[in-house]
Image (cartoon, coloured by chain):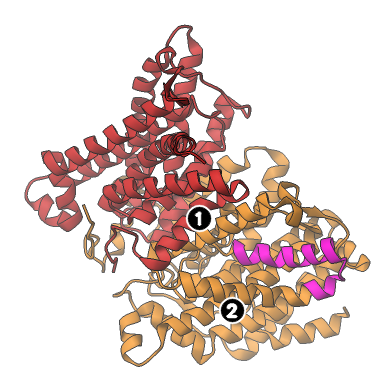
Chain colours: A orange, B red
Amino acid sequence: MSLPESRERGATSAGAGDRGGSAGGGAAGVPGGAGRPSVVMVSVGRSSRLLGTALLVVALLVAGSVLGVANVEILLDALQFTVFAMATNILIGYGGLISFGQAIFYGAGAYTIALTWYHFRLDFWYGFVAAPFVGAAMALVVGLIVLRTRGLYFALLTLAFAQLLYTIALQQIGLTNGSTGIFGSMVPSWMEDPRHAFYFSLGITVLALSALWAVVHSPFGLTLRAIRENRERAESLGVNVFRHQLLAYVIAGFFCALAGTLFVVYDSASYPSLLDWITSGFPVFMVVIGGMSLFYGPALGALVYTVAYTLISRVTSEWELIFGIVLVVVALLAPQGLAGLMVGDQRGPPLAIARRWMSGSLAWARGHQRPWARRRGPW
Amino acid sequence: MSWGVVAVALLTSLSTAASLFMVAAGLTLIFGAMRVINLAHGSLYMYGAFIAATIVGSATGDTFWYALALAPLAVVVLGTLLEVGLMRRVYRADHLVQLLATYGVLLILGDLALQFWGASPLSVSSPRVLSGSLAFQHFTFPAYELFLTGTGVLVGLALWFLLARTSLGWKVRASVEDAELLAVRGTNVKLLYTVVFAIGAFLAGLGGALITPLQGVDTGLGSSIIVAAFVVAVIGGLGSIAGAALGAGIIAVFQMAGALWLPAWEPTSLYVAMIVVLAIKPWGLLGVRDR
């Protein structure tokens, strides 16, 4: 891929430079629930947005050619997680649908390439082109069932579907080679050079983020946000909520499967743990860490996660302990994520945070929603 | 296939379902009262199992009963620390933030367990009294599985009694309806929540301690049980103890059927059961519509 071409691709996108998500309002990052303050749009001029994105893409291209191979591989890993997290954010951030089963489509994307290669020795490109559509088709079927439920039930039902596919991938050894997974040279030979794979992944990522940006800023994307803010009101205005959410689910499935294909570009493999609930958790946590209040928040989360994981794993084996502590701290002190901190969170200075933590009132301080409202339990 | 084979298979799945019920009941009790999703609940179960295995391994003789008494109490201490230090601070937060925080706790507890107990599984033999089996006609029913199933039923009845017939129970139910009014009436709701969480932790610890003779104890136990416990709780309807019991029963039947007739597909039965139930009743069998 030549440099000018990529720059032009970057220019048509508005991936990373966008600040047109929701900023301010404090609770803009938390989906669902009525009575939250309305989203304030902070928009940056179109030209500076395009310029910012183009600069970022050029910077990444330069990084891809000057960094050592090991570091390029980190970025390659970060790119596939970026697409995964950004696609999932269509549901979480914009749709207010906490899906805990996006690994279904991510894994399906990876397995589409791996299985067509393993069983039929089909060329990479057949699987690569088919995978997003496989993901979308699966999302249509799964979505018809899971979108009948809401809230936590939705999260847990999507989780059940992911676990179902995970156990199938684990058990049906004849089909999937079981827990070992499928390894091999399933990508074109030129892509086995991490640098080339990186350029390819970067191009796909820019295209994917451009498409997602267009989706989010289309009338459809706005309607989706309206449903998140107030489902009943949207319904009363004649919006077919189910159909909009189903389309969002299909779009997310499409791009999550694309992320799965980029995983194959990165690792030339596919194995059952790509479908398990830990994998489903990755994009969710990246979205929260990065912050869903900015368009590129999940991308930030993906980058921070991947880089931190690699760097910390090099020094210590206690990655899980450290990551766990970080998650707890983020949940307590920066529930809006990094993006929330960047655009000016409602949280006070550190001392005030510490005081509120001591009194156990951090979450109460969000106010505007009586915590004991809408509670009923069957006993 | 005779009824005896079915009965033995059913007993096996009922005994694991009994342990699963205890974890799911704690999960659903905590969710019902505090509306919090605790992904680390499975880790409490795992600690119950590890502590029980450590106590059994630390002395010779029939130490299983001491382990059974002490391990859940140790888990209660752990659970109380967790509630005071973290959970009460996220009760009012968004579900997503709760997921993030408790997933963090799951990772921390998992890593610490690996430090303490290592990666190789510990095993516990069942107590001498229950190591045999009961023969009926020419089928043998293992005694420990019978004991575990019976204990599950007893725990269920005790929970029902606690919630329906004691003052603690009516306070818990009142806090679900209107915590503000309960506080006005002079109940320390903060303390009440800690107690509810501790009861949930006790159930998880008990379930963990009870499962030790049936399976090896390793650090994967926490994350494998939590998904199953959620499935059980969701099938019954989140927040419903009776639902958890029903869910555990349904899972047991599904697993028994899977093990007998479709062994290759047995591990999927859990999820198939959940998908079928929620496709028909989106709020679980005994759940109420949320929001």
In space, the residues marked 2 and 1 are separated at their CA atoms by 25 Å
In which quadrant is the C terminus of chain B drawn?
bottom left
- From the viewer's side, name the closer residue of B183 and B213: B213
Q: Is residue A203 visible?
A: no
Amino acid of disc 2: Ile
Seen at 49% across and 24% down, the residue is B213
Residue where numbered disc 2 is placed: A251
Q: With respect to residue B267, does B131 lie above or below?
A: above
Specify whether residue A109 is painted magenta: yes
Disc number at residue B271?
Answer: 1
Q: With respect to residue A343, does B81 lie above or below?
A: above
Q: With respect to residue B178, does B21 lie above or below?
A: above
Q: Point out the frontmost of discs 2 and 1.
A: 1
Tell me where residue A209 appears, x and y as whole percent. Answer: 65, 78
Tell me where residue B279 appears, x and y as whole percent. Answer: 42, 67
Describe residue A226's horizontal placement relative to residue A82 as left or right: left
Please state the chain letter of the residue tagged with numbered disc 2 in the rendered image. A
Q: Residue furthest top?
A: B61
Seen at 86% across and 70% down, the residue is A122
Describe residue B231's horizontal placement relative to residue A323 as left or right: left
Describe residue A349's horizontal placement relative to residue A187 as left or right: left
- From the viewer's side, name the closer residue of A91 and B164: B164
Seen at 48% across and 76% down, the residue is A94
Disc 2 is placed on an element classified as helix
Amino acid of disc 1: Tyr
Q: Which residues are magenta?
A: A103-127
Please state the chain letter of the residue tagged with numbered disc 1 in the rendered image. B
Q: Residue furthest left?
A: B185
Specify whether residue A257 is painted magenta: no
> Magenta residues: mostly which secondary structure?
helix
